[in-house]
Amino acid sequence: MTKTPATRQPADAPLVVAHQIRKSFGDNEVLRGVDLTVDTGTVTVIIGPSGSGKTTLLRSLNALEIPDSGTVRIGDVEVDFGSVGHGRRLGRADRRTLAELRAQSGMVFQEHNLFPHKTALENVTEGPRITQHRPEQEVRAEATQLLADVGLADQADKYPHQLSGGQKQRVGIARALAMRPAVVLFDEPTSALDPELVGDVLAVIKDLAAGGRTMVIVTHEIEFARQVGDQVVFVDGGVIVERGTPAEVIGKPQQDRTRGFLRRILSR
C-alpha cells in the first residue's frame, strides 16, 4: 500500500474518487474493477441485489474492507492499495495511511454499534474526544447540538438499552457527524429497523441531504433513493451496471439487469 503525495485538488474536482477497485474473498471476486466518483454536496445512492458487491464497495471507500488493488481518494488523501490484500500484514506506515483515509469519512452501520455502557451523549463525544483530542467542552456542546438535530435532545442521558432501534440509529448518525467528516457513508441504515421506525431515520438523512452534506448510501429503499439521490448507482455481479440520476436509473433504466431488479423490488 502506498499513499500518493498530498496535492490540493481543484475546486471543482470530485470529493471522492475510487478507481479500479478489486476485492476477492477466496475464489469469489466481489468487486471487478469498479470506478466511482462523488461530487461535493451530493448524495450517491448505491442499489443492487444481495451479494452484488455494493456494501463491499462502500466499505472499501474507507478501507473497512481493504481492496486487493485500486486507488481511493477522499479530498486530498489518496491511497493506492496495490497488493496489500491477500493477507499481507499491515505495517505501521500502512496503518497510519489507512487512518488518514478513514478520518475523511464517517460511517453509519446497519447495526448501530453503540457502546452499551455509555449514554447517547457519551457515544457521540467519544470519537472526537479520544481520537481527535478536541477540548471536552467544545465536543460536548457540538454533540448536544447534533443530538438535537436528529431529534434526540431529550434522550442525551439515556443508555442504548433505553432507546428504540430508530433512536439508536439516529445516535449513530450523530456520532458519525461528530467526527466532522468530508463524506458520510451509510450501510443500509434502515435494514435492521422495524418498519414503523424507518421513517424517522430516513427523515434525518433527507435533512442532511437538504443541507448539502456529501453522502454515499447503500439502501434497499428505492423510493427513498429516488427522492434523495443526486446519483444512483446500480451494482450487480461486482460491477456498476448503470449509473445516472434517479430519473434515469430508476425512472427509465437502460439495462435489462437494472429493469429486472427494480421490477422485483418495487413489486414487493
Image: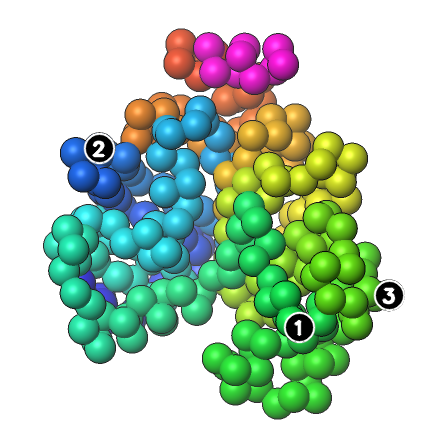
Is residue 126 left or right of 30 when viewed as pictured? right
Q: Position of residue 3 (x, y in %)?
A: 22, 67
First in sequence: mark 2 or mark 3? 2
Alpha carbon distance from label 1 to label 2? 39 Å
Q: Quadrant of residue 89?
A: bottom left
Which residue carries the number 2 mark?
Answer: 28
> Which element is circle 2 on?
strand
Which circle, 3 or 1, is nearer the viewer? 1
Which circle, 1 or 2, is nearer the viewer? 1
> In the picture shown, does residue 261 fall above or below 101?
above
> In the picture shown, does residue 67 fall above or below 94?
above
Q: Is residue 76 magenta?
A: no
Which residue carries the number 3 mark?
Answer: 154
| Residue at 81% in and 57% down | 151
Q: Position of residue 70 (x, y in %)?
A: 21, 49
Q: Quadrant of residue 228?
A: top right
Tag 3: Cα neighbours inside 10 Å, few (<14), some, or many (≥20)?
A: few
- The type of colouring in the image is rainbow
Give the position of the C terminus as an image quadrant. top right
Residue 187 tag number: none
Dominant secondary structure, magenta: helix
Which residue carries the number 1 mark?
Answer: 118
Q: Is residue 261 magenta?
A: yes
Query: 205 or 115: which is nearer to us?
Result: 115
Is residue 147 left or right of 8 when viewed as pictured? right
